[in-house]
């Protein structure tokens, strides 16, 4: 019905302008209009009168005209009745609208009545909090009960060994104890817990080990900032090491509890009695034993080498903790500790004066300040320009130092000036040249990035301030030449974003090649499977080109290095000679070792103040969490662990080191499989960053949060005002109405469904909302089934077919067993997205949309035997559906499963420990699948055509089977097809396979087995029908081409089942294309007649 868009009035009411209804006409106006109508037969008709001459002779109406009038009167009466009905419905709906509005008002927070740790008290499904799905209501109380009942503990057989089905163990990648968990942690927990719950339900001995990492650099940095900001500039040095470490432990306890709370909220079924922390007593013992053993074997050594130094954090870093920022040319960057931006991406040229002459030699550098540490100039020995200078020296313009000019075959004559300044103590390339040519190693930097006494007049200045003052001084001396753009990369600390300085320092190092070789072989020979394949290739490249690992970190929070320097009265100064170090697990043991090493000598011991790299203790995680170095039952029975699931970005930081340490210290691989999940980006594909405001707290998705609260959270951090404004702007655009309460189940399901094993994930909260709606669908479907189970209903003792099932029942059981097969197969292959899609497909499109809907009529109108069979099948389909979904949605499935009646002698306490559905050959019924889907396809096709042609009565449809089996099925299910086709269908005819449809029929291709036709009502406009068919035919042809490409792209690794499915789909599309071609030909022929 066309409505006046401006009036905004309810259908059926009088229409007026936007301002409201017009005023009613006066009595005089009414009289004038009626008088004019009565006098002028050609004017306006008076109400209830025809126009024309009232005295004229009445014309006798023909039978045809009378019939038309009758039809018109009937239509008018129908229209009037319809309008009256609409008005009545509208009037009746007014109070309902108020009721609906009232129902939509936010309920007060739900108060859980169940005592903590007790089994949840289930409330009636018709109360205010249970009418619809509310995540916080459904998810309350269950986790405490699971934990108290010990469902998450590994269950061993009576003899103490693992169960016959085997064991499955995941050591959680320990989150850093530095604050709130982010959405990446939620993804990892969701994937890991899905695998854990699935294997537990398969009857295995299952352990999910929880824990946290002490995160040395990050945690110390956060606590230091906290002290500085909250305690008037207090530093760790003001507190002293012992008191500072105590403060960090206090801070750790607070945040540790917050992290564990979120893990529980997500439904992670960890065994909290086995929780580990990388600095607890046992893991600390593991660290000390590993370090001492590897030092004794010569794999760990002390050396004075260049390290990656972060002046902001005052610590050395491994290569993996350094990010490379690529620059195309001159670029000004923000550097921590500087008010102005610093120029990088340029190359500066200057001249050194040759000692004893007026000559100069021109050199170039991308770091002018490092010239204060130069100790030589290298040229190619055959370079004619500089041959006469070999053996001479240049005079440093700012410090009292002569630098030798020497020949080096590695210098490129044609690059730059052909002369290279050498800074052995501050450049990784120059370090090697310095060693080979006996140059002096001159350190010019203090640990905080200021210049030391070796920098002469620049002592005390900050390194990048010197970059500018030094150039100014060179200009004064006439030694500055100029600068140019230079494409280069800048090393940045991954933690602080400070520019890394190569600095010469004595540190502890580890030889990596002897450890890397067996770790690489373990992946190559299949002892460890790394997924996806791209991650395996990255692992192999890195292991083949591995460098020694710098273990020392200049920190107070962490594992202090178990090494002691032996100081003697007549011995060398502290840390000047590596052989004066001894390593031991205790000071007493160190003293014994020192006495054996230096018999009869007097000495004192000084422990190395440095800590070990955090990744050293993390590398021991899989076996130290099971009790190593003690020979525990867990270590004996549950090691190696089963799978390590983590992000690919820490494949080298952590995964590779675990493999190396595991094989070295235990003689076994630490796990047999590695699965690297994708990184999560925001909905626009950007990396998540606090300054962009797109870092999403999983709690905000689970509990919901307003836009105002989201913005307020930005202000609690350490973002600059402009970054807060930018982040708030993005939040307003992304979450204009805040984030709805989605719950843990919807969040988990969404994240698992995102995991395809491919590229990064573009995360969108709207997807969470859609899966929250899916949760409600599951909730309402279960409520319906529970409402249709007879009072006191007890399911059959045995699960499976009775042999009395109707076609729809046989169909849903076939779908169930294939869903179970697909979910089990895809989870085994770590194809997580396909597993969730299989459960979603079964729940939504097969169980809810088809079987539950179609069972309603049987339960309502069938015989007692039919009703019982339908209800038993409904129970079977639902019980299995809930168990099938449990690994992905633990809370919702427990809430609903606990409401189902149990089979006789089934005493299973929780869905957590129920049996996971498996493929049942007895339910596999492809014939019933084909038959019922033919029935569904035909009825859907008829409904579609009836809707397309707006048929309201006397619809005539035809089913054209395309093979004998389809003909038998369509004939047998004739009444069911007609019933499901809707009330507007009057007659349905099943044609013979060789019989064509009558003329003037529109087609709906169902599959390669059948098509349906509808007799086009009224006079057929052949040209109009041709125009309808052509785009459908073209679309079908495009679909055929696309499907042929899909088939052509299937690799050898694709299973036969998938290949056959795709071939069948092509067959259906070809049939569809042919049907449209034949339909077009029929209408073309009709047009000629």
Image (cartoon, rainbow, N blue to C red):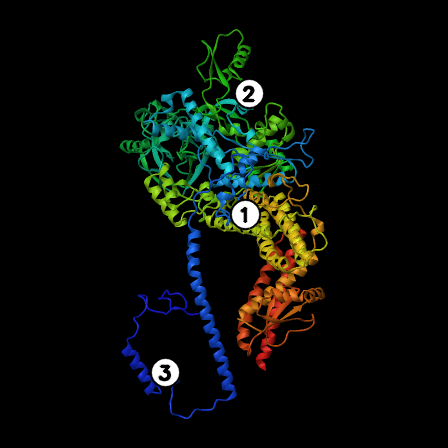
The residue that mark 1 highlights is 753
Q: Which residue lies most toward the front here? A: 791
- Density class for disc 1 (Cα within 10 Å; few <14, some 14-19, many ≥20) is some
Residue 385: name its quadrant.
Answer: top left
Q: Is residue 943 above or below residue 917?
A: below
Q: Earlier in the sequence, mark 3 or mark 2?
A: 3
The residue that mark 2 highlights is 292
User: Which of the two residues, 146 or 312, is positioned nearer the viewer here?
Assistant: 146
Q: Whole-percent x and y of residue 678?
A: 52, 43
Q: Is residue 294 above or below residue 857?
A: above
**Secondary structure state at the residue bearing disc 3:** loop
- Density class for disc 3 (Cα within 10 Å; few <14, some 14-19, many ≥20) is some
User: Which of the two residues, 508 or 1001, is positioned nearer the viewer here?
Assistant: 1001
- Density class for disc 2 (Cα within 10 Å; few <14, some 14-19, many ≥20) is some
**Secondary structure state at the residue bearing disc 1:** helix
Placement of the C terminus among the 4 image quadrants: bottom right
Position of 1085 with respect to 689 (left or right) is right
Which marked residue is nearer to the observer: mark 1 or mark 3?
3
């Amino acid at each position: 019905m066309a409505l006046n868009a401006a009036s905004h009035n309810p259908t059926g009411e009088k229409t007026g302008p936007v301002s409201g209804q017009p005023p009613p006409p006066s009595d005089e106006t009414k009289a004038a209009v009626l008088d004019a109508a009565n006098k002028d037969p050609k004017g306006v008709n008076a109400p209830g009168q025809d126009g024309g001459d009232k005295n004229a002779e009445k014309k006798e109406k023909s039978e045809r005209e009378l019939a038309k009038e009758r039809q018109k009167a009937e239509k008018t009466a129908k229209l009037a009745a319809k309008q009256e009905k609409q008005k009545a419905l509208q009037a009746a709906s007014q109070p309902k609208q108020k009721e609906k509005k009232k129902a939509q008002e936010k309920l007060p927070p739900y108060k859980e009545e169940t005592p903590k740790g007790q089994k949840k008290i289930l409330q009636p499904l018709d109360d205010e909090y249970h009418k619809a799905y509310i995540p916080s209501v459904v998810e309350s109380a269950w986790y405490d009960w699971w934990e108290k009942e010990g469902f998450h503990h590994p269950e061993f057989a009576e003899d103490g060994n693992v169960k016959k089905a085997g064991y499955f163990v995941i050591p959680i990648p320990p989150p850093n104890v530095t604050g709130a968990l982010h959405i990446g942690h939620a993804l990892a927990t969701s994937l890991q817990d899905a695998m854990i719950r699935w294997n537990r339900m398969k009857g295995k001995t299952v352990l999910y080990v929880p824990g946290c990492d002490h995160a040395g650099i990050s945690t110390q940095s956060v606590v230091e900032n906290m002290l500085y900001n909250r305690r008037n500039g207090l530093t760790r040095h003001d507190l002293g090491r012992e008191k500072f470490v105590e403060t960090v432990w206090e801070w750790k306890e607070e945040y540790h509890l917050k992290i564990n709370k979120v893990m529980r909220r997500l439904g992670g079924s960890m065994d909290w009695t086995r929780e580990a922390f990388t600095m607890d007593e046992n893991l600390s013992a593991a660290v000390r034993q590993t370090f001492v053993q590897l030092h004794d074997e010569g794999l760990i050594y002390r050396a004075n080498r260049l390290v990656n130094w972060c002046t902001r954090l005052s610590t050395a870093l491994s290569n993996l903790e350094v990010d490379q920022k690529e620059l195309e040319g001159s670029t000004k960057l923000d550097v921590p500790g500087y008010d102005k931006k610093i120029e990088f991406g340029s190359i500066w040229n200057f001249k050194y004066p040759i000692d004893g002459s007026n000559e100069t030699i021109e050199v170039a550098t991308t770091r002018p300040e490092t010239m204060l540490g130069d100790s030589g100039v290298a040229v190619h020995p055959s370079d004619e320009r500089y041959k006469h200078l070999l053996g001479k020296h240049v005079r440093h313009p700012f410090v009292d130092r002569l630098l030798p000019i020497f020949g080096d075959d590695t210098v490129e004559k044609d690059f730059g000036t052909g002369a290279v300044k050498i800074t052995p103590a501050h450049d990784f390339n120059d370090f090697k040249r310095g060693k080979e040519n006996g140059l002096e190693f001159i350190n010019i930097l203090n640990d905080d990035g200021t210049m030391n006494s070796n920098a002469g007049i620049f002592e005390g200045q900050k390194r990048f301030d010197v970059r500018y003052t030094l150039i100014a001084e060179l200009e004064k001396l006439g030694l500055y030449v100029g600068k140019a753009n230079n494409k280069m990369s800048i090393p940045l600390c991954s933690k602080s974003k400070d520019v890394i300085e190569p600095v010469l320092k004595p540190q502890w190092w580890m030889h990596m090649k002897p450890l890397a070789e067996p770790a690489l072989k373990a992946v190559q020979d299949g002892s460890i499977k790394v997924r996806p394949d791209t991650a395996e290739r990255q692992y192999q490249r890195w292991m083949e080109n591995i460098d020694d690992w710098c273990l020392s970190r200049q920190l107070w929070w962490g594992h202090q290095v178990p090494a002691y320097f032996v100081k003697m009265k007549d011995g060398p100064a502290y840390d000047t000679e590596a052989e004066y170090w001894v390593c031991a697990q205790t000071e007493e043991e160190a003293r014994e070792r020192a006495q054996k090493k230096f018999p009869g000598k007097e000495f004192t011991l000084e422990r190395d103040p440095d800590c070990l790299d955090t990744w050293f203790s993390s590398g021991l995680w899989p076996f130290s969490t099971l009790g190593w170095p003690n020979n525990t039952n867990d270590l004996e029975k549950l090691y190696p662990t089963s799978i390590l699931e983590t992000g690919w970005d820490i494949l080298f930081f952590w995964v590779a080191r675990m493999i190396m340490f595991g094989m070295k210290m235990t003689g076994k691989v630490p796990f047999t499989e590695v699965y690297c999940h994708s990184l999560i980006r925001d909905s626009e594909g950007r990396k998540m960053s606090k300054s962009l405001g797109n870092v999403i707290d999983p709690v905000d998705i689970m509990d919901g949060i307003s836009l105002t609260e989201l913005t307020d959270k930005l202000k609690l951090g350490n973002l600059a005002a402009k970054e807060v404004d930018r982040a708030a702007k993005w939040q307003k655009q992304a979450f204009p109405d805040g984030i709805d309460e989605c719950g843990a189940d919807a969040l988990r399901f969404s994240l698992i469904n995102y995991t395809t094993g491919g590229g990064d994930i573009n995360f969108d909260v709207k997807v969470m909302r859609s899966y929250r709606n899916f949760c409600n669908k599951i909730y309402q479907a279960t409520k319906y089934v529970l409402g249709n189970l007879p009072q006191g209903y007890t399911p059959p003792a045995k699960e499976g077919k009775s042999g009395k099932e109707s076609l729809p029942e046989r169909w849903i059981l076939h779908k169930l067993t294939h869903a179970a097969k697909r979910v089990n197969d895809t989870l085994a292959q770590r194809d997580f997205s396909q597993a969730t899609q299989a459960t979603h497909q079964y729940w939504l499109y097969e169980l809810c949309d088809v079987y539950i809907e179609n069972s309603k009529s049987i339960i309502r109108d069938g015989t007692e035997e039919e009703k019982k069979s339908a209800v038993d099948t409904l129970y079977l389909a639902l019980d299995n559906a809930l168990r099938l979904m449990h690994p992905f949605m633990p809370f919702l499935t427990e809430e609903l499963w606990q409401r189902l009646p149990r089979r006789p002698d089934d005493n299973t306490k929780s869905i957590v420990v129920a049996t996971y559905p498996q493929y049942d050959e007895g339910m596999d019924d492809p014939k019933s699948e084909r038959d019922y889907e033919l029935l569904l396809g035909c009825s859907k096709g008829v409904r579609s055509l009836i809707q397309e042609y707006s048929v309201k009565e006397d619809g005539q449809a035809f089913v054209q089977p395309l093979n004998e089996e389809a003909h038998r099925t369509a004939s047998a299910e004739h009444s069911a097809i007609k019933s499901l086709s809707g009330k507007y269908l009057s007659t349905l005819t099943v044609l013979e396979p060789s019989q064509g449809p009558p003329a003037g029929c529109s087609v709906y291709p169902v599959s390669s087995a059948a098509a349906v036709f509808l007799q086009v009502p009224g006079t057929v406009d052949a040209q109009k029908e041709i125009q309808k068919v052509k785009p459908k035919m073209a679309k079908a042809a495009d679909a055929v081409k696309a499907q042929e490409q899909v088939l052509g792209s299937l690799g050898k690794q694709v299973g036969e089942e998938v290949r056959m499915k795709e071939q069948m789909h092509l067959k259906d599309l070809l049939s569809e294309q042919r049907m449209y071609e034949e339909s077009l030909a029929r209408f073309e022929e009709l047009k000629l007649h």
